[in-house]
Image: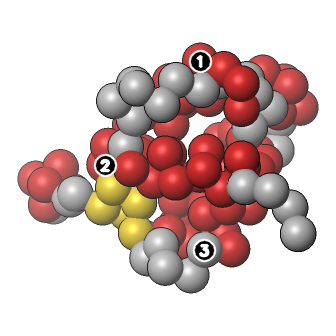
Amino acid sequence: MQEKMRKKKTIPRDLALQLWRIVLGNNKVYNSKFPLLDPWLKFVESNNEIQAISRDVWEQLIDFLTETKQAEDYDDNSAWPVLIDEFMEHLNEPKN
């Protein structure tokens, strides 16, 4: 059973959202430490094209949230997963 779990390359979106909220989202310290957490959760939740979260996104999200406190901190030349790049593009879109 454990071997099967290690080979997984994705996690279902809804499960990832639940886990992020349990581990990070319900803690005021984390919310102040990671200001982009709530916008990230809303982006993932509202994007119906996202069916699963890749292992890369899962493993790099905390690093991203630690390094990127606001949109201006984002380095688009860094090697972030595509979903994180799409999130930042979404944040920088002009609001209609």
Quarter holding the C terminus is bottom right
Q: Residue at x 80, y 32 (%)?
A: 35
Above or below — where is 85 with respect to 64?
Answer: below
Above or below — where is 22 with respect to 63?
Answer: below
What crowding class fits label 1: few (fewer than 14 Cα within 10 Å), some (14-19), or many (20 or more)? few
- Tell me if label 2 and label 3 are in contact, CB under 8 Å: no
Q: Residue at x 18, y 49 (%)?
A: 6
Q: Position of residue 29 (x, y in %)?
A: 84, 24
Q: Which residue is mark 2?
A: 55
Q: Position of residue 38 (x, y in %)?
A: 78, 48
The image's colouring method is: secondary structure
Above or below — where is 56 with respect to 78?
Answer: below
Q: Amino acid at mark 3?
A: Asn
Q: Which one is closest to the eye, mark 1 or mark 2?
A: 1
- Tell me if label 3 and label 1 are in contact, CB under 8 Å: no
Q: Nearer the viewer, residue 21 or 79?
A: 79
Q: Earlier in the sequence, mark 2 or mark 3?
A: 3
Q: Which one is closest to the eye, mark 2 or mark 3?
A: 3
Q: Earlier in the sequence, mark 3 or mark 1?
A: 3
Q: Amino acid at mark 1?
A: Glu
Element class at badge 2: helix
Q: Nearer the viewer, residue 86 or 2?
A: 86
Answer with left or right where residue 41 lies relative to residue 16: right
Q: Which mark is residue 47?
A: 3
In whole angstroms, how far apart are the C-alphas of marks 1 and 2? 19 Å
Element class at badge 3: loop
Which quadrant holds residue 12?
bottom left
